[in-house]
Amino acid sequence: MVFEAPVKDLMFNIAHIAKMAETPEEATCDLDVAAAVLAEFGRFCAEEIAPLNAVGDRIGARFENGHVATPPGFRDAYAKFVAMGWQGLQHPETYGGQGMPRAVGAAATEIINAANMSFALCPLLTDGAIDALLTFGSPDMKQTYLAKLVSGTWTGTMNLTEPQAGSDLGLLRTRAEPDPDGTCRITGTKIYITYGEHDLAENIIHLVLARTPDAPKGVRGISLFLVPKFLVDSNGKPGPRNAVRCQSIEHKLGVRASPTTILEFEGATGFLIGRENAGLEYMFTMMNAARFAVGVQGVAIGERAYQLALSHAKGRLQGRPVDGSAREAVAIIHHPDVRRMLARMRALTEGGRAMVAFAAGWQDLAHHAGTPEERADALAIAEFLVPLVKGFCSEMSIEITSAGIQIYGGMGFVEETGAAQHYRDARILPIYEGTTGIQANDLVGRKTLRDAGATAGRIAAMIALTEQDLRRGSPAAQDIAVRLSQSRTAFQSVVDHLVRNGTQDVNAAYAGAVPYLMLSGNLVAGWQLARSVIAAEAALARGEDPAFMSAKIATALFYAHHILIDTELQRVRVIDGAPSLLGATF
Ligand SMILES: Cc1cc2nc3c(=O)[nH]c(=O)nc-3n(C[C@H](O)[C@H](O)[C@H](O)COP(=O)(O)OP(=O)(O)OC[C@H]3O[C@@H](n4cnc5c(N)ncnc54)[C@H](O)[C@@H]3O)c2cc1C
């Protein structure tokens, strides 16, 4: 099965859904340039990275004597990825990057993850390390590490998890003891560290959460350290090996080519990033970027599974049509139920993709809007959207990839077709970078209750404006306006309910957290598809690409009728569901 990057749809979103038009000119890029870059990246990923997906799954990363070997082909492909400068796509030109907007960066992240999620995890973690150093690194650190990370010559990792500290980072124990030379000795065990050891790059830059000796208990006593695998000499070259060692790698359900390592820090030299005890705040910057990227992975794996299922549905002959229009077996794509599954896969994927573009646009605005107030306003929206992108898109990727197996029938359950790999690979997405439960808690606590529903209210007001625009459109647009309005009302009533009762009956509020998250993600994805309808109808009126624009409208209509309507059930779960949930006995 050949993978084809969905560049046309990605560009539609960049042009119409991301807020590029509102971002100051110097922080955006020309649409033709973005299209050319994504087309070239799509070609590279389809030809060089996608063919390694199945072999990577079959062979997996291997561990021998402290070394990790990636599957055959990964080293060559990574060398080409670096040589072509792809790691630097969205990073500043000062450090050798191409300075593309986030909206374009997110599109590229989708493409490489659709091609091969295990491979793409390495650049994804490097992106996170670059973001953290750009924001909080000292001038010296930036000078020493950023150009190498931006080029991809060195890679980055994120070291949070320990055996006793998963979702609850307040429990972490890794120690950082100051040395007279201003560095620290880092000692402790980190588990599940993605690409913590590998053979793709000449150095690995670990960002590690640890506690200094007199640090306060809990999350207020965590500091962030940079710990290179090889200490870097005064010429910027990797020198002696640091005291960090890979103890083993995990055997996993999916993403088997991505080494998930257990790292032992045995008095390793670490360099404090920013202020002592401010590590969690810094890590949040990195986590927000990584959480967003995991949502993008959900869209990516959905696209890959959809392409595979579609090709099978067109080729597999089985069953006569229910309307009697043929006497022989037809391709299964003619059966209404197979169409239902394909349409659902497509609508969830395109809805998620549009939400990603929208969120990336707000991230660009949060960095580049003209005034501090505008930047703060944009940041509030961008941060509200992070748990939606992460939680909704990752949960939906399980449904989409499962439907991909269903469309294959028995052959979907058999490994050779590749459908099963997508399902297995997708299963990690609602777990790492904060489980869905943790995303939902974040949405309720930090994103909704903390500002008494103000940001949620701004989003609802923007949706109401879209409804007005839709009412001036075609019958399909007007139909979508009705569904969107019902969903927005459900969202508003849930937000009001949480703000009114959330601080008095905390358990009840958090009992509804995941349904609230899924309601919000569903609504925002459906809203972006509704905005797509407005853009597509305008394009149709200009005679632009009728097949693509009509398909976009059809997908949005399907979404409104089959997916957006679930928001009503989700509303009931939040508002009426807490007592029975909390009353359940185990
Ligand atoms: C393949 C893979 C790659 C990973 N890569 C990295 C990496 O690069 N760096 C890194 O630091 N970590 C990494 N992780 C770790 C990952 O982020 C954690 O597994 C994840 O945060 C969950 O922690 P846990 O496994 O300890 O589960 P737990 O925290 O034990 O959670 C178990 C269950 O309890 C629920 N739960 C826990 N606390 C709460 C709460 N307060 N409210 C509601 N529900 C709650 C969770 O939602 C979950 O359902 C990786 C994990 C895997 C499997």
Image (cartoon, rainbow, N blue to C red):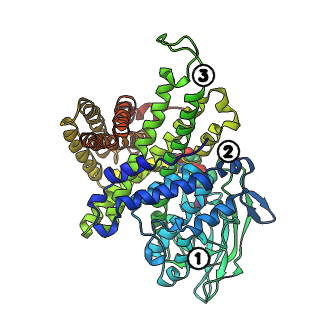
Q: Nearer the viewer, residue 426 or 84?
A: 84
Q: Secondary structure at mark 2?
A: loop
Q: Residues within 10 Å of mark 3 (few under 14, many from 20)?
A: some
Residue at the spot of label 3: 317
How many angstroms separate mark 2 from mark 3 (CA)?
32 Å
In the image, taking residue 2 as reference, residue 558 lies left or right, namely left
Q: Residues within 10 Å of mark 1 (few under 14, many from 20)?
A: few
Residue 115 in the image: state x and y as whole percent: 57, 50
Residue 297 in the image: state x and y as whole percent: 52, 50
Residue 527 in the image: state x and y as whole percent: 32, 42
**Given this view, does label 1 or label 3 mark the residue nearer the observer?**
3
How many angstroms separate mark 2 from mark 1 (CA)?
38 Å
Sequence-first tag of 2 and 3: 2
Q: Secondary structure at mark 3?
A: loop
Q: Is mark 1 within 8 Å of ligand 1?
A: no
How many angstroms separate mark 1 from mark 3 (CA)?
68 Å
Looking at the picture, which amino acid does disc 3 mark? Leu
Relative height, residue 74 to residue 468 (above, below): below
Cβ–Cβ under 8 Å for marks 1 and 3: no
The image's mark for residue 253 is 2
Q: Nearer the viewer, residue 375 or 457?
A: 375
In the image, taking residue 313 as reference, residue 377 lies left or right, namely left
Looking at the picture, which amino acid does disc 2 mark? Leu
Residue at the spot of label 1: 213
Sequence-first tag of 1 and 3: 1
**Given this view, does label 2 or label 3 mark the residue nearer the observer?**
3
The answer to whether any part of residue 283 appears in the image is: yes
Sequence-first tag of 2 and 1: 1
